[in-house]
Image (cartoon, helix red, strand yellow):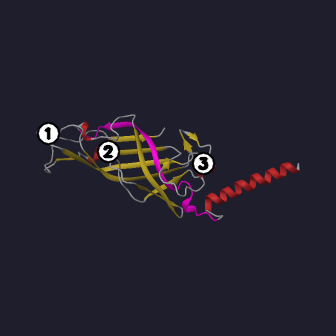
Amino acid sequence: MAVGIVVGLAVGLTFGLRDKFSSDGSNGTDSSSLYPVGSYSFESTLQNISTACTSRSSTWRCYPYSQGSNATFFWSISRSGSSYNVSSSENPFAPSFTNKTATLLDEGKPTERLSFAFDTSRTIIPSEPITPTNRAAKCTYSSTLFQATIWTRRSGGRELSDVDDLLKTKAGKKFVAWPGDVQVLQMRPYKAGAPNCEDTDGNKITDVQGGYGDCSCEYSSF
C-alpha cells in the first residue's frame, strides 16, 4: 500500500512539473526557447501538381519539377508571449517571408499543429518557349496563396512517442530535421485571371490566357 502511494505521488509530481515546465517556462527555462521554437528543415514530397489556371501548362511549375520528388523547406519558429511566428531562410525555389503569424490548433492533443497562410506572387520561368521567336520569358502569378500546416505531435500520421523529449529546449541547434508532419500548399485560383507573361524586353505575351481551374503545388511529408 505504501509503495503504491509513493509511486502515485512520484508520477503525479512528474507530470505536474512537466506541465508547469511546458506551459510557463518556469524552473529557470525561458518558454520562448521551448519546442517547437527553433530552426528546422522540413522534409516533404511534391504530391500533386495542377496547371488548370493557365492555358499553357509550361508556365506553372512546382519545385522540384517532378511529382514524387523530395523538397525541403527551411523555416524558423519563434514565440512572443502566446503567439508563434514563422520565418523562412533564403530559398530560390520557395517564397521568402518574415514573422508570419501561426495559429496553434488543438493545443495539447495528438493533433496539435501550427498553421499559417499569406498571399504572395510567384514568378516562373516556363519550361518551354512561349514566344514565336523563342525568346526567354517569365510569368508572374499575383494573388497566390501560400499555406502551411506543421504538426507538433504527429509523424507519419501517428502520435509521436517521444513528445516529452521534444518539449526540451533546442539550444544551439539550427535547421535540425523537423520530427513531425508538414503539409504545404501553393495555390493560384482561376478567378485571379491570366498570368502576366513577358519576354526579356518587357513585351507582354498575350497568347497565354487564364484557365478554368486552380493551379497548385501540394507538398506533404505523409
In this rendering, position of residue 160 left or right of residue 65: right
Q: Nearer the viewer, mark 2 or mark 1?
A: 1
Q: Earlier in the sequence, mark 1 or mark 3?
A: 3
Residue in the image at 11% along x and 39% along y: 133
- Specify start and end residues of the magenta stretch as a single range: 28-54
- Distance between the alpha carbons at the discs numbered 2 and 1: 28 Å
**Residue 206 at what x, y percent from top left?**
15, 44
Q: Is residue 108 magenta?
A: no
Q: Residues within 10 Å of mark 2 (few under 14, many from 20)?
A: some
* Residue 31 lies in quadrant: bottom right
* Residue 44 lies in quadrant: top left
Q: Residue lying at the far front in this picture: please name it.
A: 172
Label 2 sits on residue = 189
- Distance between the alpha carbons at the discs numbered 1 and 3: 55 Å
Residue in the image at 60% along x and 53% along y: 167
Judging depth in this view, the residue of 38 and 216 nearest the camera is 38
| Helix, strand or loop under label 2 | loop
Total number of numbered labels? 3
- Residue 36: image tag: none
Q: Residues within 10 Å of mark 3 (few under 14, many from 20)?
A: few
Q: Label 3 sits on what residue type?
A: Lys
- Residue 134: image tag: 1
Residue in the image at 88% along x and 48% along y: 1
Labels 1 and 3 touching (C-beta < 8 A) = no
Work out whether 144 lies above or below 132: below
| Helix, strand or loop under label 3 | loop
Q: Label 2 sits on what residue type?
A: Pro
| Helix, strand or loop under label 1 | loop
Judging depth in this view, the residue of 127 and 117 nearest the camera is 127
Q: Earlier in the sequence, mark 2 or mark 3?
A: 3
Q: Nearer the viewer, mark 1 or mark 3?
A: 1
Label 3 sits on residue = 109
